[in-house]
Image (cartoon, helix red, strand yellow):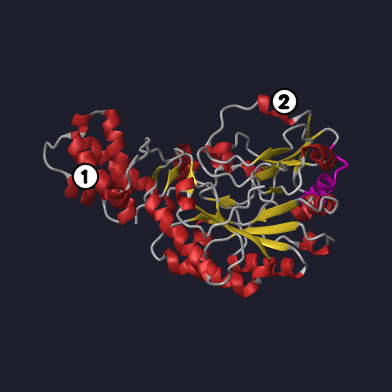
C-alpha cells in the first residue's frame, strides 16, 4: 500500500501528463481532489481519473465531477457549499515522530525561576536535560526565524519556565458567529506533550517548546481584580491542565486559592490520568475535573500519548469519589462509518462509572479547525483518516461537517445522554445559533 507521500507523487505525475492544458493553478486543484478521492475511497489515482475524464472536457465540467465525487453529500445538501482546495505539499521531513515517552532535552529558565517547585522537580526527574538560563522568553523569541511543522515536531524537546507578566486570563476565544458559553481561560501554560492530529496549536503556536509559568501568586493577585461571582474559568485551553502536574504541582495551590472563591467554578481539562495531586487536595466542591472523551479507536489513531478511554474514566471515577464534580467534553466528535455505535458505547461507559448527580456538564462539538490547519495536519500526519470526510467552509470560515450532518450528530448524542440523565447540563461548543435552537434539550451555562 502506498503511503500518502507516494500517492501524491503519483497523482502529480498523472495530472501533469493528462491535464497540462489547464495550467498550474487548476492542476493544483485537480491534484488535491484526485489525491483526496483516491485516499478516501482506497482506490488508485488512475481509477479516479478514468471515472471522471472525458477527452478534451472543459475544466469546469471536470472539476464539478471531482467535487461531486469528493463531497457527495455536502455538494448536494449544503446551501453554501464552499470547499477548501489549497496546494497539497507533503514531505517525509515534516511527518510527526511519536515518541513513546516524554523526556525534554533542554529546560530554558528565566532568571528568578530557579527556586520554583517546577524547576526543582524538572531537575530531579530529568537529570540528563540541559538547563539553560535565558534573560526572558521574549528576547529568546526575537532570535528565532520562521516557524514550520518541523519546528512544531521538536517542541517536546524544550521546556520554558517563565514568569508571566500579563494576559493571565481571557474570555474563551469563541469562534465568530457562534453562541458563547461565557467561559474564561486561566492562561497557565502554552503547548502540549500530547500529539492530537486535529490540535489547533499546530498552526497557532510559534515556538518550538512548551511554556510553563511558575508565578502563580501573580495570577492569584490578578484574579482578585478580574473575577465575578458565578463565572466558569479553567486551564486546558492552550495546554493540558494535568499533563505535567506531578512536576509543576500547580493544581494544589490553584485548588487552595479557589477554596476561598466558592462562588466560582474552576475546571481542570485533561486527556491524562494524572490525578495524584487532586486526590490529596482538600476542596470545597467548586472544582470541576473534566476529560475530553472519544471512542478508543479515535484515541488510538488521533490522540497519541494520551491516556486510554478506560484510564480517563477510571480517573474520573476516583475524582468523583473524592467529591469533585466531573465534566466530559465530546469535543471534537469525529464522524466516521459506525460513529453512532462507538460514541454510544462511550456514553454507556461514562454512566457506568459516574453518577449523573456528579456530572457538572457535558459539551458537544464536532470536528472543526481553521483552514490553514488542514495543510499542517496533512504534513504531520499524511496518512490520517479525519480529513477523508466532508469538511467544508462553515458559517465562521472554519472547516466543518455540513450543517445537516452536525445537527444529526448532536440530536443523536443528546438522545443517548438523555437516556441516562435528564438533569446533566449538555451544551454545544462553538456552534451557530440555528443548530442550538433546533433542539430545546441543550443547556445554557454561560456565566
Residue 228 percent location from the top left of the image: 76, 43
The percent position of residue 219, horizontal first and vertical second, equals: 80, 40
Q: Could you tell me residue 34's position as x and y percent?
A: 28, 45
Residue at 29% x, 47% y: name it: 75
**Element class at badge 2:** helix
Q: Secondary structure at mark 1?
A: helix
Cα gap from disc 2 to disc 1, whole angstroms:
52 Å
Residue under label 2 = 139
Residue 297, position in %: x, y? 49, 64
Residue holding disc 1 = 65
Q: Is residue 320 magenta?
A: no
Name the residue: 27% across, 49% down. Answer: 76
Vertical placement of residue 253 versus 343, above or below = above
Q: Give neighbour class at mark 1: few <14, some 14-19, many 20+ (Cα, 10 Å).
A: some
Residue in the picture at 78% in, 68% down: 322
Question: Which labelled disc corresponds to residue 330?
Answer: none
Q: Quadrant of the N terminus?
A: bottom left
Q: Residue furthest right?
A: 115
Q: Is residue 119 magenta?
A: yes
What are the residue bounds of the magenta stretch?
A: 113-127
Amino acid at each position: 500500500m502506498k503511503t500518502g507521500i507516494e500517492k501524491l507523487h503519483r497523482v502529480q505525475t498523472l495530472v501533469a501528463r493528462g491535464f497540462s492544458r489547464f495550467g498550474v493553478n487548476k492542476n493544483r486543484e485537480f491534484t488535491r481532489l484526485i489525491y483526496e478521492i483516491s485516499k478516501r475511497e482506497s482506490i488508485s489515482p488512475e481509477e479516479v481519473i478514468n471515472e471522471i475524464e472525458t477527452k478534451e472536457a472543459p475544466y469546469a465540467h471536470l472539476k464539478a465531477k471531482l467535487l461531486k465525487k469528493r463531497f457527495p453529500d455536502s455538494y448536494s445538501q449544503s446551501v453554501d457549499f464552499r470547499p477548501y482546495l489549497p496546494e497539497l505539499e507533503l514531505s517525509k521531513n515534516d511527518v510527526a515522530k511519536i515518541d513513546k515517552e516524554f523526556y525534554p532535552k533542554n529546560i530554558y529558565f528565566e532568571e528568578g525561576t530557579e527556586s520554583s517547585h517546577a524547576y526543582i522537580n524538572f531537575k530531579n526527574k530529568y537529570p540528563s536535560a540541559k538547563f539553560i538560563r535565558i534573560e526572558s522568553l521574549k528576547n529568546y523569541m526575537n532570535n528565532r526565524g520562521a516557524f514550520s511543522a518541523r519546528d512544531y515536531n521538536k517542541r517536546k524537546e524544550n521546556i520554558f519556565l517563565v514568569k508571566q507578566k500579563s494576559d493571565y486570563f481571557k474570555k474563551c476565544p469563541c469562534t465568530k458567529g457562534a453562541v458563547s458559553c461565557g467561559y474564561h481561560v486561566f492562561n497557565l501554560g502554552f503547548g502540549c506533550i500530547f500529539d492530537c492530529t486535529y490540535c489547533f496549536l499546530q498552526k497557532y503556536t510559534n515556538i518550538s517548546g512548551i511554556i510553563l509559568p511558575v508565578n502563580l501568586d501573580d495570577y492569584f493577585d490578578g484574579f482578585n481584580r478580574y473575577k465575578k461571582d458565578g463565572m466558569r474559568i479553567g486551564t486546558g485551553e492552550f495546554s493540558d491542565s494535568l499533563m505535567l502536574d506531578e512536576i509543576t504541582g500547580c493544581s494544589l495551590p490553584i485548588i487552595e486559592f479557589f477554596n476561598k472563591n466558592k462562588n466560582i467554578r474552576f475546571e481542570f481539562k485533561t486527556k491524562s490520568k494524572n490525578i495524584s495531586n487532586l486526590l490529596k487536595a482538600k476542596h470545597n466542591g467548586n472544582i470541576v475535573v473534566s476529560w475530553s472523551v472519544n471512542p478508543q479507536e479515535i484515541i488510538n489513531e488521533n490522540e497519541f500519548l494520551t491516556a486510554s478511554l478506560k484510564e480517563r474514566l477510571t480517573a474520573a471515577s476516583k475524582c468523583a469519589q473524592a467529591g469533585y464534580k466531573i465534566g466530559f467534553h465530546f469535543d471534537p466528535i469525529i464522524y466516521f462509518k459506525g460513529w453512532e455505535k462507538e460514541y454510544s458505547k462511550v456514553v454507556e461507559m461514562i454512566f457506568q462509572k459516574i453518577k449523573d448527580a456528579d456530572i457538572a456538564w457535558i459539551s458537544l462539538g464536532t470536528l472543526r479547525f481553521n483552514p490553514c490547519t488542514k495543510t499542517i495536519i496533512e504534513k504531520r500526519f499524511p496518512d490520517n483518516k479525519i480529513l477523508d470526510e466532508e469538511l467544508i467552509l462553515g458559517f465562521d470560515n472554519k472547516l466543518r461537517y455540513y450543517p445537516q450532518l452536525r445537527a444529526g450528530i448532536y440530536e443523536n448524542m443528546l438522545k443517548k445522554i438523555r437516556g441516562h440523565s435528564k438533569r446533566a447540563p449538555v451544551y454545544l461548543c462553538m456552534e451557530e445559533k440555528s443548530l442550538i435552537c433546533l433542539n430545546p434539550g441543550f443547556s445554557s451555562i454561560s456565566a
